[in-house]
Structures are given as structure tokens and as C-alpha cells.
Amino acid sequence: MLLEDPGEGQGSGAHMISTARVPADKPVRIAFSLDNASDDTPPEDAIPLVFPELDQQLQPLPPCHDSLESMQVFKQHCQIAEEYNEVKKEIALLEERKKELIAKLDQAEKEKGDAAQLAREFEVLMEENRALKLAQSQCVEQLEKLRIQYQKRQGSS
């Protein structure tokens, strides 16, 4: 984390703290003012949300600017809050991946069940085909016998 000098680019006496571990496209900046004279300053009990996605009770409390230890604790709390956010994001991604894998597994099980059903149907059809071929060959034999008998009758008459 970087604590900027209140004199650098800040004529109002505001201090800026930015975190070093935040992605470049989403910088986190924490601003607070030592000058409470303006009318648009929120009341002291209204703590600005440093990390809006965190629950209120997990928000880092503003440090006491006169205490180096308070500033260090605040910085550490901000780092922990960042890590917490990263872990929450990773958990959300992993849960989404879990849902995708469960859906794939369900689809594979359905396809496996479909394949088993098709295999059973195939076996039934193969048995029916075998039975029909046997019946056909028996009919061909019987027809041939009938032709022979018919020819014998024709020949004897």
C-alpha cells in the first residue's frame, strides 16, 4: 500500500491510500479528510465503504492519523480485505465450474443411459431379425417342398 503525502496533488489536505495488489483496471483508493469544516462532509458515524462489496462489519475502519500503529493496522486490514475479496471471487468461480461439471456429468450419465437403452433395443432387434431369418428359411424350404410335390403331381397325371 502507498500512503500519499497530503501535499502531493491534494490542496484540501486529504490523504489518499491506494493498494498495490489491486488489478490495474480497478484501483482502490481510500480518501479521508482531516478538515471537517465543510458542510457536505458525512457525519462521523457514517463510515465510507472502502470495499463496497464487503459486509459493513468487515469494512476496514478509518485509522487514527496521529498513530502509526493505527495506520499500519488499517493498511493490514485493507490487505486482508483485498485477499478476502480475491478468495470470494475464486470461490464463486469454482462454484460456477462445479455447476458446469455437474451439468456435464448429468449429460454424460443421460447419454450413458441412452446408450444402454439403445444397446438393449439393438439386442431385441437382432434376436427378432434372427427369428425372422429362420422363419424365412423354413418358409423357403417348405415352398420348395410344395413345388416338388406339385411337380410330382403334374408329372404323374
Image (cartoon, rainbow, N blue to C red):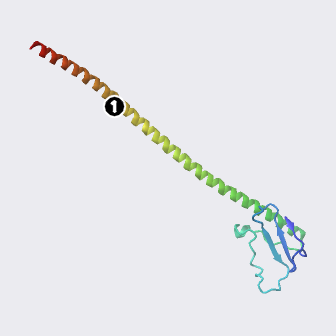
Residue at (84% x, 72% y) in the render: 16
Q: Is residue 7 above or below residue 145?
A: below
> In terms of depth relative to the viewer, which is nearer, 149 or 35?
149
Q: Is residue 60 above or below residue 36?
A: above
* Residue type of the residue flagged with mark 1: Glu
> In terms of depth relative to the viewer, which is nearer, 147 or 23?
147
Q: Counting other residues with Cα less than 10 Å from the Cα at mark 1, is it few (<14), some (14-19), or many (20 or more)?
A: few
Q: Is residue 38 left or right of residue 7?
A: left
Q: Position of residue 60 (x, y in %)?
A: 77, 68
Q: Is residue 69 left or right of residue 80?
A: right
Residue at (73% x, 60% y) in the render: 84
Question: What is the quadrant of the N terminus in the image?
Answer: bottom right
Q: Element at badge 1?
A: helix
Residue at (74% x, 68% y) in the render: 51
> In terms of depth relative to the viewer, which is nearer, 58 or 122?
122
Mark 1 — residue?
A: 128
Q: Quadrant of residue 46?
A: bottom right
Q: Position of residue 105 (x, y in %)?
A: 55, 46
Q: Is residue 157 left or right of residue 118?
A: left
Question: What is the quadrant of the C terminus in the image?
Answer: top left
Q: Position of residue 3 (x, y in %)?
A: 87, 68
Q: Quadrant of residue 7?
A: bottom right
Q: Is residue 73 left or right of residue 138?
A: right
- Residue farthest along the top direction in this orientation: 156
Report the number of discs: 1
Q: Position of residue 78 (x, y in %)?
A: 79, 65
Q: Quadrant of residue 24?
A: bottom right
Q: Is residue 88 above or below residue 147?
A: below
